[in-house]
Image (cartoon, rainbow, N blue to C red):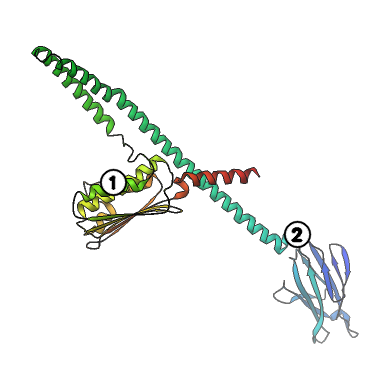
Amino acid sequence: MHIEQAIADRTTYPASGSLRLPPRTRDLEIDYVGLSFVAPQKVRFRYRLDGRDDTWQEPGTRRQAFYSDLRPGTYRFRVIASNNDGLWNDEGATLDVVVAPAWYQTRAFLVLSVVTGVMALWGLYQRRMRQLACRLNARFDERLSERTRVARDIHDTLLQTVQGTKMVADDALTRPDDAARMRRAMEQVFTWLDQASKEGRATVNLLRAPATDHNDLADAFRRAIDDCGGQGSIQASLSVTGGAREFHPVVRDEIYRIGYEAIRNACTHSRGSRLAVEVSYARDLTVRIVDDGVGIEPAVADAGKDGHFGLQGMRERAARIGAKLTVVSSPGSGTDIVLVVPGRAIFREQTTTLFNRLRVHFTN
C-alpha cells in the first residue's frame, strides 16, 4: 500500500506522512495505490478517516478517496487493500491530516463570542429594568398629579363652601337678638353644609392623603406603634437596618399603608404580647411585621375574610408598586408578614445611577 498524493481545492500536496491544510479547505482528494503483480485489476480497497468516518468505506477498485467540508481539526487517513485471493493487508498506509481553523473557528473567537453574548444579554436586562423603573415612575407621577388635582378640587369646592358658611355664621352672630336674621343665616348654613358634605363625600373617597411628610418610614411606623400601644398591652418594637433612602412619595405612601394595616391588625386582632417591626434598607427595601398572637386561618390568609378588605388591600397596594407580599401564619403560631420592594425600581439614586451607566455605555 502507498499513498501517492493529496489534492485540496485544486492544490496538490505530497503525501509525506503528515499533511497540513489551510483554513476553509472545502474539497479533499487522496490518491493511493495497492501493488499486486498477479492481478492488479482485482485489488480492492477500504479506507477511513479517523475523526470523520465511523466505519470503513468500500470504494471497490477505486484508488481515490473524496471528502468535502472538513471541520478544523486533526484526522488520520487509513487505507488497506486485498489481493485477488481476498487476503487483506491489515497494516495498510496512513496519512495524518490537519485542517487549520479560520479566525472565526478558533477557541479565542468562541470565548469572545460567548462573552459578547453575555454582555449583550446583560445590557438588554439592564435596559429592561430601566424601562420598568421609568414606567413605574411615570405611573407614580400620574397618580401624584391626580392626587394634586383632587386636592385642588377640594380647595375650590369644599373649603370655599366651609369658608363661606363661616362668614355667614359670623355675620349672624353680630346681631344675636335678630331672630329672623339668625334663622335665615342658619338655613343658609344648613344648605351650604349639606352641599359641602356631598362634595366632600364624592371627592375624599377618591383621595388618599400622603401618609408621611418625608421618606423616613421609621418615624411613620413609630407613630403607628405608639397608637398601637395605646390600644392594648402589646409590647411593640421597631428596628431599622441601613440608612434611609429616597424614593417616590407614592411608593412611600403605599409601603406605609401596607405596614400600618399590618400593625393595626396585630394590635386589634392578634391578642399577642409582642410585636416586632423591622425595616431594612439594602439592595431592596424590606419591611417585616411579626407578632406572637393567635395567627390567621390558612384560608383567610390566602383569600381574605368575607366583608373585610385588609389583606386584599395590602396585596393590591403591593402589586401596584411591583413588590412581593408574603403572609405566613397558622393558628396559634403568630403572623409573619414580609414586604419586599425592588430597590432598582424605587430608590432614586439607583435608578439615576443605572440611567447614567446605560447612557455612557450606549454613547461609547
Residue at the image position 64 percent from the left and 42 percent from the top: 363
Q: 123 above or below 205?
A: below
Image coordinates for residue 176, horizontal then vertical, percent: 11, 15
Viewed as shown, does residue 132 lie left or right of 171? right
Res 26 → quadrant: bottom right
Badge 1, how many Cα within 10 Å: few under 14, some, many 20+? Answer: few
Q: Amino acid at mark 2?
A: Trp
Which residue is identified by label 2? 103
Res 63 seen here: no
For the N terminus, give its image quadrant.
bottom right
- Quick one: 31 or 131, which is closer to the camera? 131
Q: Residue furthest right?
A: 37
Eyeballing the image, is 53 above or below 250? below
- Identify which residue, 158 or 52, lies in the foreground: 158
What residue is shown at x 87% (from left), y 64% (from top)? 11
Measured along the vertical axis of the image, is residue 11 above or below residue 130?
Answer: below
Residue 128 horizontal/vertical position (percent):
52, 47
Q: Which residue is mark 1?
A: 223
Mark 1 residue element: helix
Which quarter of the figure has residue 328? Answer: bottom left
- State the image coordinates of residue 97 (x, y, percent, origin top left): 80, 72
Q: Earlier in the sequence, mark 2 or mark 1?
A: 2
Question: Within the image, what quadrant is residue 161 found in?
Answer: top left
For residue 123, side relative to residue 132 (left or right): right
What's the distance in space between the residues labelled 2 and 1, CA to CA? 68 Å
How crowded pointer 2 is (Cα within 10 Å; few <14, some 14-19, many 20+) is rated as few
Residue type at tag 1: Arg
Task: Pinpoint residue 280: horizontal percent, then vertical percent.
Answer: 39, 54
Residue drawn at (51%, 45%) of the image: 130
